[in-house]
Image: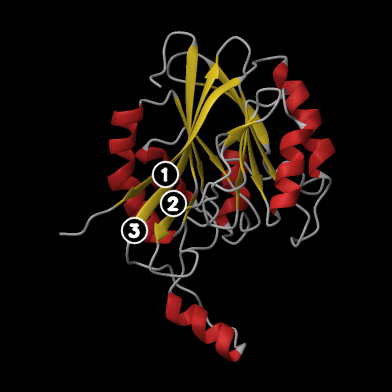
Amino acid sequence: MVAGNESFRILFVGDVVGRPGRRALRELLPHILEEERPHFVIINSENSAGGFGVNRRSAKALFDAGADVLTNGNHTWDKVEAFELVDEDPRVLRPENLPPGTPGCGCGVFEAKCGTRVGVLNVIGRVFMNPAEDPFRAGRRMLDDMRAETPLLFVDFHGEATSEKQAFGWHVDGLATAVVGTHTHVPTADSRILKNGTAYQSDAGMTGGYEGVIGMDRDASLRRFLTGYPIRFEPATGDLRLDAVLIDADKQTGRATAIRRVQKRLLEG
């Protein structure tokens, strides 16, 4: 489906993992932008700096590649720069339901290049994750607030459990344009539009090295599983791919009309 005058297209790119992920994004995203012509691009950046966290350099690389907004997750604070970065640049979001007093913001309404306003919300789950505030109540409250400014509302739900993500999707069905999960780095095959018009996918996947284990060097990952030692991880460098999700929506109602998974592979040589 080609986005028309009344249709709005959002591209969401799964977790970018380290320098290999940034390379994949830099080389593959231009082709997707040319082929799919999205109006707005959101990228999860929480692993973009060395595989853990985000800093000014990695954020700039993602914005230079074409991002309009960056979302994050449980690795948001792994780099010290992030504490200042989220206050300096409102386009860099951290999960909304972190404790009160946390730097930065978890949502915002942004203007696409075509002039249309888009609300973006970043929340983090609580199942098998570090303690956080309730994403269901916090998320619904912020979506209700942003709905006063625009019907186009996108949610990055950063969480481990598919059950929690699916439950949130139903919780905001008809309010959010789309709910797409991140964190597991494995793209799921459950793309669909829920009963009241919200596009949903449990996980967008990742942008990085598929010859590793969820984007990290496979030998180090195997040694950790086999020995239990706290072995240092480095991003995997082989078989670079970009995982993303495309959502089409009605600009007037915010209801999704299509959702589709996208994966591009960087061919060496």
Is 11 above or below relative to 99? above
Residue 263 left/right relative to 122: left
Q: Quadrant of residue 145?
A: top right
Number of other residues with Cα within 10 Å of mark 3, as a class: few under 14, some 14 to 19, many 20 or more: many
Q: Amino acid at mark 3?
A: Leu
Residue 97 left/right relative to 213: right
Residue at x 63% of width, y 52% of height:
73
From the image, tell me which residue sits under label 3. 240
From the image, tell me which residue sits under label 1. 62
Q: How many marks?
A: 3
The answer to the question of whether label 2 and label 1 lie on touching residues, with beta carbons closer than 8 A, is yes
CA distance for labels 3 and 1 = 16 Å
The answer to the question of whether label 3 and label 1 lie on touching residues, with beta carbons closer than 8 A, is no
From the image, tell me which residue sits under label 2. 58
The colour mode here is secondary structure
Mark 3 and mark 2 lie on one chain; the one further toward the N terminus is 2
Q: Amino acid at mark 2?
A: Ser
| Nearer to the camera, 150 or 191 | 191
Secondary structure under tag 1 reads helix
Residue at x 54% of width, y 20% of height:
249
Is 12 above or below relative to 150? below
CA distance for labels 2 and 1 = 6 Å
Residue at x 30% of width, y 45% of height:
28
* Quarter occupied by the C terminus: bottom left
Is 44 above or below relative to 172? below
Q: Nearer the viewer, mark 3 or mark 2?
A: 3
Secondary structure under tag 3 reads strand
Q: Quadrant of residue 121?
A: top right
Q: Amino acid at mark 1?
A: Leu
